[in-house]
Image (cartoon, grey):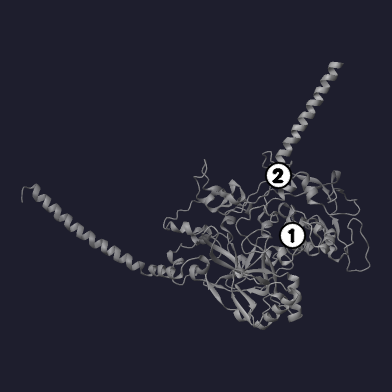
């Protein structure tokens, strides 16, 4: 018996020792930043999709059934998080902008705060891209940012950060947090409706938004109309008919055995899900309607967005630009660039060129210098450049796909493209572009924006109740109105010199209170690269010869880019494309003229070569004659 007891004691000691070592090992792994993989994060190798018949769990961790009272929306964190590492997913590209430790990478499309009544157009981002402002610089808390832009955000990020505004903290309890909406991408239900998601965001129904758009539930009521004391777990009855509490109703018979619900989850995200946030529509009359235009050549070939923009379980989406593998520490990112698929076959032990059937481009008649100074997209992506840039609307900037979509071609913000400009890597590529416009303060040489609420109050004092044009275009500001606004802002703010930034210039008052302006770094346009739609080789620039770009007035170097501004006295000005490309206009024009005389040079060259050939042939024959005579014994 003693031996048995001793053995049991040894086993217990060994078990405690092993448990301690295991705990230390797990702690070390977490300290090293290695994410724990959940059941749904690591594939067992089967290419078949998993069937998602699961229980709905609310934000309190309680199971939802048909008999639950009150019926609550399901929580993505608790419902999906049972099998998927929610925290790891939250570190993915679509959700991690608020994390200052994440590399910003190449500049992308910003969130644009556009307000015609105050002549404001400001590019916003939590990422440290050059030329953007952080939302808090405009007085926007994370909660307010989510309310304004959440309709095209798949949840997470700022939507889960508590506001630092005391008044909004209470609103946050009523609205709930805007959790990561997994279904925004992975829901295969035919009734999934991101437009409904946008409606719920507008009603401040953050905790209900994903449920309301999922396809098997519906929503009524609005958190916006509820008082700060409202508790969704203890519903109240309000006498005011305008105060309807948020309520969810699940479709009949969705709760099956053991109250499980069948989700139609797709692993490969369909392109239509991407399009809700990543669409654009040109507004110029010369541009064809969608049914008249050709889609991206990759989509025509049968590929989808996620064939190139791939993700692992951590959702760190591959963006597909050169050098991304260094920014994201993802070695696979380099394989999903233009070169990675079409050209690069030497960077690994096995050939990679030709991925997904990509053809190998010959480029036989193109000088090698083009590949040193141009991106692939310069010739192959976006609209063919014309003398004037086009104007376009995007999902994020103009609420495309929602009931608030700005359909007018004049609606702010005014986005121009293609603007050929030099990127951070030194290469020239096509971009979309906006000119920022905002009211701010000048301290030294630095300009900081004034909070939007302050500007709105000042505008009310100066121009009163204004009617914004039905088109959503600029509310035109005269020089006199700008002077009044700057004076009002001086009284309101008092710190620094009040200024208005628009059209690349900074407007301020001099010592005599007269309006003066000058170009300033704060007014530089914000540009982000264009990658799609990709045109086939037969429609790429240069296919008709060098004159596609190299002419004295060609659009590539000398296209006109309008300077967009609300200041009436400054409207109508333009810049030429070479000013964004960092090239010398005189040199480009002289070089272009060489192509005019190049046919003559070819004629002269071929003619001279023919004459030289005849002369050489004549002397060759003379030499043969002399040699023949010598061999015949004659002098």
How far across and down, in percent of the image, does residue 411 sit?
67, 73
**Numbered label attached to residue 370:** none
Instruction: Note whether residue 303 is visible.
Output: yes
Instruction: Note whether residue 358 is visible.
Output: no
How far across and down, in percent of the image, does residue 524 sit?
59, 69
Front of the two marks 1 and 2: 1
**In this orientation, which residue lies closer to the viewer: 525 or 43?**
525
> From the viewer's perspective, is 343 left or right of 98?
left
Q: Count the numbered circles shown.
A: 2
> From the viewer's perspective, is 25 left or right of 293?
right
Q: Residues within 10 Å of mark 2 (few under 14, many from 20)?
A: few
**In this view, 257 is above or below 10:** below
Disc 2 secondary structure class = loop
**In this orientation, which residue lies closer to the viewer: 293 or 387?**
387
- Lower sequence index among marks 1 and 2: 2
Residue that carries the numbered disc 2 in the rendered image: 49
Disc 1 secondary structure class = helix
Q: Answer with the quarter of the image where residue 291 lies.
A: bottom right
Cα separation, mark 1 vs mark 2, equals: 23 Å
Q: Residues within 10 Å of mark 1 (few under 14, many from 20)?
A: many
In the rendered image, the quadrant that contains the N terminus is top right
| Residue at the image point whose x is 50% and y is 61% from the top | 540
How far across and down, in percent of the image, does residue 407 sit?
68, 71
**In this orientation, which residue lies closer to the viewer: 625 or 114?**
114
> From the viewer's perspective, is 69 left or right of 205?
right
**In this view, 582 is above or below 7:** below
The reply to whether callout 1 and callout 2 are in contact (CB within 8 Å) is no
How far across and down, in percent of the image, does residue 621 sit?
16, 55
Q: Answer with the quarter of the image where residue 592 lies.
A: bottom left
**Numbered label attached to residue 194:** 1
């Amino acid at each position: 018996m003693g031996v048995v007891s001793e053995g049991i004691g040894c086993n217990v000691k060994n078990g405690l020792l092993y448990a301690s070592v295991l705990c230390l090992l797990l702690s070390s792994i977490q300290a090293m930043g290695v994410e724990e993989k959940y059941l749904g994060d690591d594939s067992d190798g089967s290419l078949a999709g998993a069937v998602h018949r699961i229980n709905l769990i609310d934000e309190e961790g309680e199971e939802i059934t048909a008999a639950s009272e009150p019926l609550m929306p399901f929580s993505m964190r608790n419902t999906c998080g049972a099998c998927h590492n929610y925290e790891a997913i939250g570190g993915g590209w679509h959700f991690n902008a608020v994390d200052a430790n994440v590399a910003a990478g190449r500049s992308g499309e910003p969130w644009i705060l556009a307000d015609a009544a105050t002549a404001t157009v400001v590019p916003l981002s939590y990422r440290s891209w050059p030329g953007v402002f952080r939302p808090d610089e405009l007085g926007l808390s994370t909660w307010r940012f989510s309310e304004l832009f959440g309709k095209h955000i798949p949840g997470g990020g700022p939507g889960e950060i508590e506001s630092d505004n005391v008044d909004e903290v209470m609103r946050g309890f009523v609205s709930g947090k805007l959790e990561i909406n997994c279904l925004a991408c992975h829901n295969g239900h035919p009734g999934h409706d991101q437009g409904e998601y946008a409606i719920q965001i507008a009603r401040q129904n953050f905790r209900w938004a994903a449920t309301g758009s999922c396809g098997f539930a519906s929503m009524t009521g609005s958190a916006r109309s509820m008082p700060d004391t409202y508790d969704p777990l203890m519903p109240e009855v309000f006498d005011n008919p305008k105060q309807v509490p948020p309520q969810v109703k699940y479709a009949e018979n969705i709760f099956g055995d053991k109250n499980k619900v069948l989700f139609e989850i797709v692993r490969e995200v369909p392109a239509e899900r991407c399009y809700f946030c990543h669409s654009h529509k040109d507004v110029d009359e010369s541009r064809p309607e969608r049914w008249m235009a050709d889609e991206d050549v990759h989509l025509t070939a049968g590929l989808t967005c996620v064939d190139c923009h791939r993700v692992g379980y951590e959702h760190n989406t591959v963006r597909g630009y050169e050098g991304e593998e260094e920014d994201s520490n993802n070695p696979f990112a380099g394989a999903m660039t233009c070169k990675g698929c079409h050209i690069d076959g030497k960077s690994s032990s096995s050939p990679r060129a030709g991925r997904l059937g990509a053809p190998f481009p010959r480029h036989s008649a193109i000088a090698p210098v083009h590949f040193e100074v141009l991106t692939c997209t310069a010739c192959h992506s976006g609209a063919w450049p014309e003398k004037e840039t086009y104007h376009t609307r995007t999902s994020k900037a103009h609420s495309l796909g929602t009931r608030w979509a700005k359909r007018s071609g004049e609606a702010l913000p005014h986005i121009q493209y293609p603007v050929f400009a030099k990127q951070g890597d030194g290469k020239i590529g096509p971009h979309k572009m906006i000119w920022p416009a905002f009211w701010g303060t000048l301290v030294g040489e630095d300009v900081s924006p004034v909070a939007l609420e302050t500007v709105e109050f000042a505008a009310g004092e100066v121009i009163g109740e204004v009617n914004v044009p039905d088109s959503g275009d600029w509310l035109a500001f005269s020089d006199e109105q700008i002077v009044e606004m700057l004076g009002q802002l001086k009284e309101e703010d008092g710190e620094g010199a009040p200024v208005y930034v628009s059209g690349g210039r900074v407007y301020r008052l001099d010592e005599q209170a007269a309006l003066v302006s000058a170009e300033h770094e704060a007014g530089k346009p914000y540009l982000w690269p264009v990658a799609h739609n990709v045109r086939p080789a037969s429609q790429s620039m240069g296919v008709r010869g060098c004159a596609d770009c190299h002419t004295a007035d060609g659009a590539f170097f000398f296209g006109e880019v309008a300077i967009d501004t609300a200041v009436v006295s400054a409207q109508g000005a333009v810049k030429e494309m070479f000013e964004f490309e960092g090239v010398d206009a005189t040199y480009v024009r002289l070089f272009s003229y060489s192509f005019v005389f190049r046919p003559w040079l070819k004629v002269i060259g071929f003619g001279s070569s023919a004459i030289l050939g005849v002369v050489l042939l004549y002397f060759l024959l003379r030499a043969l004659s002399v040699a023949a005579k010598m061999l015949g014994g004659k002098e």
